[in-house]
Image (cartoon, grey):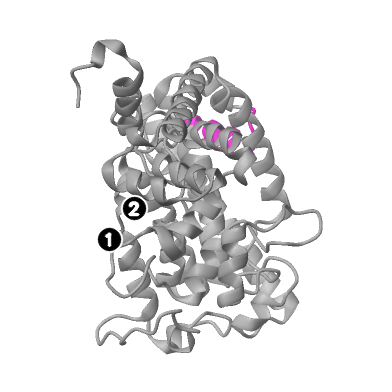
């Protein structure tokens, strides 16, 4: 994007606050393009291909995974950023990175890790994403992590908004330590680009979870007709295309749903820009509330849709049974590795044995499990607990 196309409140790559570890500039890519590329080439990003979105990978090849979800979030984020005159590459980088810290089996895996890690500081996938990009991903000779720009790290750590305010959970030690070394202004809002990425996440999972839920048969079209947002769209599609097959009708609804939410977000954001007198990227951070947002009407519809998905899809009996198995796999793996670190792969075993306290070993075990794909976690569990798998290596 050339400079004349930037909105006044966009984050420009030439004014980036830089990287923690100074790196020679690229002659062909902006700093935010390099961030995007580093995320795309990260091992943690590739693993998302085999990590659960809603349905565990063995349940079907056509359901969305964390990888396809992240790519869809990035596409939506780029489209919105372009419409608002923002830096598309920064929005895309934040979108691609936002789920790197998810353990296997989605929120079931996270719940299990949080439970077993409770005595050792807990587990949170957003913090894990932050730790991956700042220390755990080890690819470069000169530094740990991906050495992303300040703006991308800010977008990652504040994916859900400012941190450390009244009524919020205490800041995680890893975030506190990094912030002391390189202040991230944790109590302020992020750039407009990072805010776009966060809400693109909402748009993607709302629409595509409806799609996967219908495809799986766990929810039916008739259930959706009175659900906020999607119900009116379905009625309109059924009226306009009654003879089209159900799969095409479903796709048309999802397409319209995304468009409807994107258009609402763009219109509301432009209204807030005018109302708040926002003229610079710093104005965005100091506004005291999100600049990028849905209208009040859309927020109410979104709330109703989420309630439906929680009740009828995420807590469906079939999904709950899978979640129970997933929690058991993660919990038992953790207990085994913590009690018997000799069961870990050699490089992880050496690190575990070098840890002086149980809390450090527990965090290392959690890091190892969080990096597993669904299929690898199931395979490891079978190797360790299935007596019929004694011959497996």
Please report contact status of discs 2 and 1: CB closer than 8 Å, yes or no: yes
| In the image, residue 360 above or below residue 143 | above
Quadrant holding the C terminus: top left
**Residue 45: numbered disc:** 2
In this view, the residue in front, 119 or 29, is 119
The x, y position of residue 59, in whole percent, is: 34, 23
In percent of the image, x 30 and y 12: which residue is there?
A: 387
Residue annotated with mark 1: 41
Residue 157 is left or right of residue 168, and the answer is left
User: SS class of the residue under badge 1?
Assistant: loop
Q: Position of residue 116 (x, y in %)?
A: 57, 33
- Region of the chain picked out in magenta, as a range: 226-241
- Magenta highlight: main SS: helix
Residue 265 image offset from top left, x and y in percent: 59, 59
Question: Dividing the picture into quarters, in which one does residue 48 lie?
Answer: top left
Q: Nearer the viewer, residue 285 or 86?
A: 285
Q: Is residue 33 left or right of residue 304?
A: left
Q: Is residue 242 visible?
A: no
Report the Cα–Cα distance between label 2 and label 1: 7 Å
Question: Could you tell me which residue is drawn at 51 percent across and 60 percent down?
Answer: 197
- SS for callout 2: helix
Q: Give the quarter of the figure containing the N terminus.
A: bottom left
Question: Who's the residue at 48% across and 69% down the image?
Answer: 81
Place residue 61 in its image quadrant: top left
């Amino acid at each position: 994007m050339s400079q004349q196309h930037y909105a006044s409140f966009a984050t420009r790559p030439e004014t980036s606050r830089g990287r923690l570890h100074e790196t020679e500039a690229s002659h062909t890519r902006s700093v935010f393009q390099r961030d995007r590329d580093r995320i795309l080439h990260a091992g943690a990003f590739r693993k998302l291909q085999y990590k659960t979105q809603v349905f565990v990978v063995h349940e079907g090849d056509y359901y969305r995974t964390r990888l396809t979800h992240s790519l869809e979030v990035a596409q939506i984020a780029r489209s919105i950023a372009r419409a608002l005159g923002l830096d598309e590459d920064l929005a895309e980088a934040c979108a691609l990175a936002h789920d790197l810290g998810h353990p296997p089996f989605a929120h079931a895996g996270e719940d299990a890790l949080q439970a077993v890690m409770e005595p050792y500081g807990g587990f949170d996938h957003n913090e894990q994403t932050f730790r991956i990009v700042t220390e755990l991903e080890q690819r470069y000779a000169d530094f740990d992590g991906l050495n992303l720009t300040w703006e991308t790290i800010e977008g990652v750590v504040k994916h859900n908004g400012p941190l450390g305010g009244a009524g919020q959970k205490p800041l995680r030690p890893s975030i506190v330590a990094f912030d002391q070394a390189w202040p991230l202004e944790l109590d302020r809002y992020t750039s407009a680009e990072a805010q776009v990425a966060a809400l693109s996440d909402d748009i993607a999972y709302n629409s595509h979870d409806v799609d996967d839920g219908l495809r799986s048969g766990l929810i039916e079209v008739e259930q959706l007709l009175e659900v906020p947002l999607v119900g009116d769209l379905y009625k309109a599609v059924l009226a306009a295309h009654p003879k089209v097959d159900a799969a095409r009708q479903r796709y048309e609804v999802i397409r319209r749903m995304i468009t409807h939410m994107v258009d609402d977000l763009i219109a509301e954001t432009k209204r807030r820009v005018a109302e708040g007198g926002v003229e610079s990227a710093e104005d965005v951070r100091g506004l005291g509330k999100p600049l990028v947002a849905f209208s009040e009407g859309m927020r109410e519809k979104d709330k109703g849709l989420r309630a439906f998905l929680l009740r009828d899809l995420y807590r469906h009996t079939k999904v709950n049974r899978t979640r129970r198995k997933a929690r058991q796999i993660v919990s038992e793996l953790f207990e085994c590795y913590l009690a018997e670190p000799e069961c870990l792969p050699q490089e992880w075993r050496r690190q575990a044995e070098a840890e002086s306290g149980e809390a450090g070993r527990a965090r290392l075990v959690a890091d190892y499990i969080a990096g597993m794909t669904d299929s690898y976690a199931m395979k490891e569990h079978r190797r360790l607990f299935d007596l019929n798998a004694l011959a497996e290596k």
